[in-house]
Amino acid sequence: MKSSVGVIERYVEQLEEDAEHIISKIERLYHEAEKGYELTRSNHPVGAAQRGDAKQIWQDPEGETKNLQDELREEYESWYAQAEELVSTHLPQRTEEFERRRTDVKKYIKLEKNAKFDPERYVNSASDYFAEQRNIVKAVPGKVEAEKLSLRQQISDTFSKDEIQQARELLDEELMRAAGVLAGVALERHLQIECDEAELGYEHNDGIASLAQTLYEADEINSTTLSSLETLGQIRNDCAHANQQGPNEHKVRKLIDDTDDYIRGRGV
């Protein structure tokens, strides 16, 4: 199930709604079974026969309790099938844990856990096992987002290295404006990714200086780095505007070299 983060988030939200419904039915199931147990005790004389009939309520429920149990089994298996697909695709290392908890939850749905003396305790235990599964599922969107950012970073790094190399070649050919613009594109994209990783908003047309300011205001970079990036942004703008005097070779080389250093994590 390879989908966008937004689609997966909505899918997980729906699974959470279904899970809440399942928990509610588990509570009803145990209370119905408890009522049946108490009714059996009140309608039979004290003794082995009574104990046997009451025990049968848990092992082989009838009527409303049986119907509720069948509905619950079906709904839980449907939930599990959908959730397991997400987990196996995006969190395969937790699939075994997810499957183990299925066995635990099913024991409670089958009423293998005789809760005649304390149904609330057993409902809470079932909820705890189910909560472990739900928490695994809820971790999926974050994992997908991290994978997405990591992939974007890898792609960006590859493009940036190519662009930096091309910028150096353009500079060697004395095409200073083109070299500066290309290096600026690489730097701007890298700053956008840094904003994404820090979950900072920015406009599509924000340039180097604006992106750097956003990072600075969020304490992602210090004032020295901000000042250096603003300088690089100005060099890039001088290269992009043909109606202005073009920057000299020294400034363009600084833009290329400093951009390369910043993208590689060496600072500027």
Image (cartoon, helix red, strand yellow):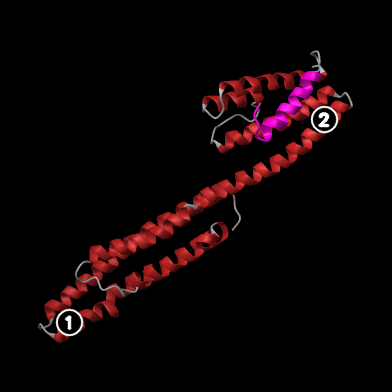
Magenta includes 226?
Answer: no
Residue marked by disc 2: 168
Picture residue at 71% right of the left edge, 29% below the top: 259
Mark 1: which secondary structure?
helix
Q: In the rendered view, would you say 79 is above or below 195?
A: below
- Can you say which quadrant of the picture contains the N terminus? bottom right
Tell me where the magenta segment starts and ends, as one range. Answer: 250-268
- Majority secondary structure of magenta residues: helix
* Residue at x-position 57% and y-position 60%: 89
The crowding category of the residue bearing disc 1, from other C-alpha atoms within 10 Å (few below 14, some 14 to 19, many at least 20), is some
Q: Which residue is mark 1?
A: 51
**Residue 244 position by quadrant:** top right
Direction from residue 184 to residue 203 in the image, left or right:
left
Query: Circle 2 sits in a helix, a strand or a loop, which is it?
Result: helix
Q: Position of residue 55 (x, y in %)?
A: 22, 80
| Up/down of 114 relative to 238, above or below | below
Sooner in the amino-acid sequence: mark 2 or mark 1: 1
Q: Residue furthest left?
A: 45
- Residues 71 and 110: in front is 110
Estimate the spatial distance between the alpha carbons at disc 2 and disc 1, rounded to whole Å: 88 Å
* Residue type, label 1: Arg
Identify which residue is drawn at 61% across, 29% down.
203
Looking at the rendered structure, the kind of residue marked 2 is Arg
Viewer-side label of 2, 1: 2
